[in-house]
Image: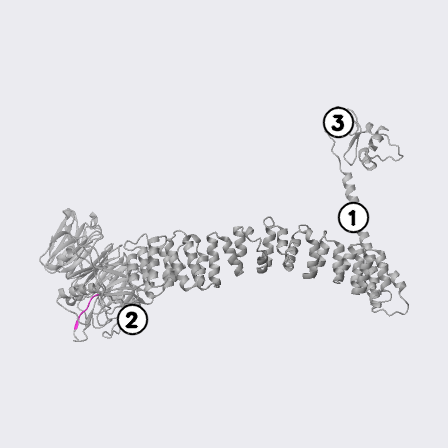
Amino acid sequence: MPALQGPSGPTAQAQAGTNKRALPSRTARHTWDWPSASCALTRRTERRTQGTPKQQKPPQTTFPRVPSPRRLPAPHMTAAGRAMAEAAEKESGYNEESTDESEEDESEEEPKLKYERLSNGVTEILQKDAASCMTVHEKFLALGTHYGKVYLLDVQGNITQKFDVSPVKINQISLDESGEHMGVCSEDGKVQVFGLYSAEEFHETFDCPIKIVAVHPHFVRSHFKQFVTGGKKLLLYERGWMNRWKPSVLHEGEGNIRNIKWRGHLIAWANNMGVKILDMISKQRITNVPRDDISLRPDMYPCSLCWKDNLTLIIGWGNSVKICSVKERHASEMRDLPNRYVEIVFQFDTEFYISGLAPLCDQLVILSYVKEILEKTEVECCARPRLDIVQPLPESCEEISSDALTVRGFQENECRDYHLEYSEGESLFYIISPRDVVVAKERDQDDHIDWLLEKKKYEEALMAAEISQKTIKKHKILDIGLAYINHLVEKGEYDLAARKCQKILGKNTELWEFEVYKFKEIGQLKAISRYLPRRDPVLKPLIYEMVLHEFLESDYEGFATLIKEWPGDLYNNTIIVQAVVDHLKKDPQNRTLLRTLAELYTYDQRYGRALEIYLTLRHKDVFQLIHKHNLFSSIKDKIVLLMDFDSEKAVDMLLDNEDKISIDRVVEELENRPELQHVYLHKLFKRDHHKGQRYHEKQISLYAEYDRPNLLPFLRDSTHCPLEKALEICQQRNFVEETVYLLSRMGNSRSALKMIMEELQDVDKAIEFAKEQDDGELWEDLILYSIDKPPFITGLLNNIGTHVDPILLIHRIKEGMEIPNLRDSLVKILQDYNLQILLREGCKKILVADSLSLLKKMHRTQMKGVLVDEENICESCLSPILPSDASKSFNVVVFHCRHMFHKECLPVSNTVSSVQFCNICSAKHRGPGSAILEMKK
């Protein structure tokens, strides 16, 4: 069958031209200039570590990641890590000199992957043989060797089955998706396709080496019994009639076929000229992607192919990466072209040669072959291979991570010796070299926490452990927290370490006590004191006493704060009291210690001693102490002290508790302090005018002495005050206003008015007094007294109009007397008169309107009908108002007051008027019994 022809190479190349990206060189040794590159790869981090191997149970060994020499110096290695690296180099017979020449701290960026060397059976195999290829299935691994053996391995590397296929190198192993059929090809031209669990088998030997074989992904199904081989030709084998295999040539004439990847209905293969894709449905080749660098030998730098999904192919060749998308062609564009075409949607260049590709979500994993020049000898040699993770972006690429891997014998390997296989869905990547198989996997939360702890990022590690506490297996939140506390203590951040104890130690009393003793050893008990638990849990009393003693020796204020904040049952109160008393012997006037001692006495229920100290200190908490513990019996002889300290609070407390300390007892205690006695009695009078009535006579003198502004209000409000005594005191002290009030209250209004006029000479007050008394004789006296005083006349003219006829005053004014503002006063009198007239007229209008409105309302009410039924009775004879026989005529009289009478039961009116009135309602107006008399008549 002739080779199928597809679209020419330049078409695919033209489609890719605008999407090409270049990966910039990372070293001074390599300088690349790519004219077609439109953007460069942005590096996020370059992570090269050479760390300590993790202690794992067999069969797996932790694989060290080390930096590539020359580009970035290696960090310090632990003894275990160095021993493992040296062992790998010793086995290969080569000691690398440049790796340890310079060292640098590791990047702060966390690694993306972790590595383990596949051991157990693999180690045993590679001690006698070398790996040539490997295929990964989700259930097992298939490893081919240079001695023609094929081994089936479990995921731990244990050998489960062995096949002797050929005496020479196995070039490729292919598995279908079910993992039940395997295809194998070798360097001597042998091809075998057989069932692992069935007797189905195909054998063929060609006259040339077969580099590649690929079975149909669904080979297990009867109508998909197909596989392809690649040597000088690309051959398709299909099982047909009588179970015979029929070969057909898909492609030839462009050199050896070196790689094939079959996905769905698409087969991609690479030969010396480039990459082709065949659509198995239409049996048409739909694209040709030529290789970029034709100077590289295709057998030394083979092409890497990888299907990301059914329509996306990733090509890596040399140092170029292309991402190709298979798309459907529009019907209008078909003509003689295939119904599908390929577009290169993304392309970039790498610094090193590509040995393998694999997808990781929307990222790419690239295995690179690296060469370097030793600084001392200037000789080019093979360096450690690199595993990079790259994130393609719309206009650029970003390098997520880059790891240099120490594989056995890497100094002797070529680009074609490395392979990258992956397990779909598990994010497992297998790096295959002749002497080693390394497994790379995404780091889990335990690995993330390990890295954070290694970087001493304890708080982030603790947070990550709390978030993922159900999934982590290796770490415990408590262990991380304790390590965090120790780290903070080592750094000298004692307060933060103590604060974290609350969250980390929780209710574990043993750990709390251990941490307290640790803080004591370093002299930082004060730092942890604020965070000690006080309820649930409670530590041993000794712990709290130890902290209190520390403060008592060096910080009285801090000691007082703890005593105030801590409940008294946390420690032995007697011990602490004795310690404070001992310190007071050295400093008896220390107010802080005295105040603290009072609080301790309070906790110990020795309230009397606490009260004495508070009163001595004049402390504000004394009132709270009295109220809280009902100490009123203890303060009966300390009332003066309390009043001196805070009279307002003391009086309020005494008045609120009259049943416990009587008024008489308080007045008696304050007998020698009249100013305090007045404060108490004044507050008592404000609360109740009658409770302290026996002391009202006493209060007159107290108000006169200490609080004259409140004397007049007291005299007005008190009904138990002796007026004669009050008048005597006010006259002795010449209190005019108070005397005026008392005289008026005692009925001597003329004397009061005279005092106002003579003593105060205040016409406004005199007028106001006269208004209050509303006595015509007082107005007459006021006019007589003012008639010869022009200013007084002016005041009277301005205010007398509404109380006394102004003519009485005007007639008595002597002719020729000059009166200030007379005109204004007369105008005001006229205005007041007009105002009175207007008010009267307005009131009259309102009265008439209201009367009319009420009359109309009454008329409407009287015009309404009144319901009369069989339940109503005659108010005179008390029989039903309606007759039992409705056919008979009857007369009923219903009044607006709802009283009803038979007409014949109404008494005959003696008046000439025909208007009748309800006898019952009329009797109410005339008097009792009048209605009965009326009815008898």
Looking at the rendered structure, the number of numbered marks drawn on it comes to: 3
Q: Which residue is mark 1?
A: 850
- In screen coordinates, is 103 left or right of 891? left
User: Which stretch appears magenta?
Assistant: 380-385
**Measuring 41% from the left and 62% from the top, which residue is drawn there?**
551
- The three-letter code of the residue at mark 1 reads Asp
Gap between marks 1 and 3, in whole Å? 40 Å
Question: Residue 257, how many percent across, how many down?
Answer: 17, 61
Amino acid at dot 2: Ala
Of callouts 2 and 1, which one flags the residue occurring earlier in the amino acid sequence? 2
**Side of 597 where 54 appears, left or right:** left
Where 420 falls versus 876 (above or below)? below
Instruction: Check disc 2 and report its element: helix, strand or loop.
Output: loop
Q: Which mark is residue 880?
A: 3
Report if residue 3 is visible in the image.
Answer: no
Q: Amino acid at mark 3?
A: Pro
Query: Label 3 to label 2, Cα distance in Å?
Result: 121 Å
Q: How is the image coloured?
A: one colour
Q: Earlier in the sequence, mark 3 or mark 2?
A: 2
Q: Which residue is mark 2?
A: 37
Marks 2 and 1: which is nearer the front?
A: 1
Q: Which x, y percent locates residue 521? A: 33, 62
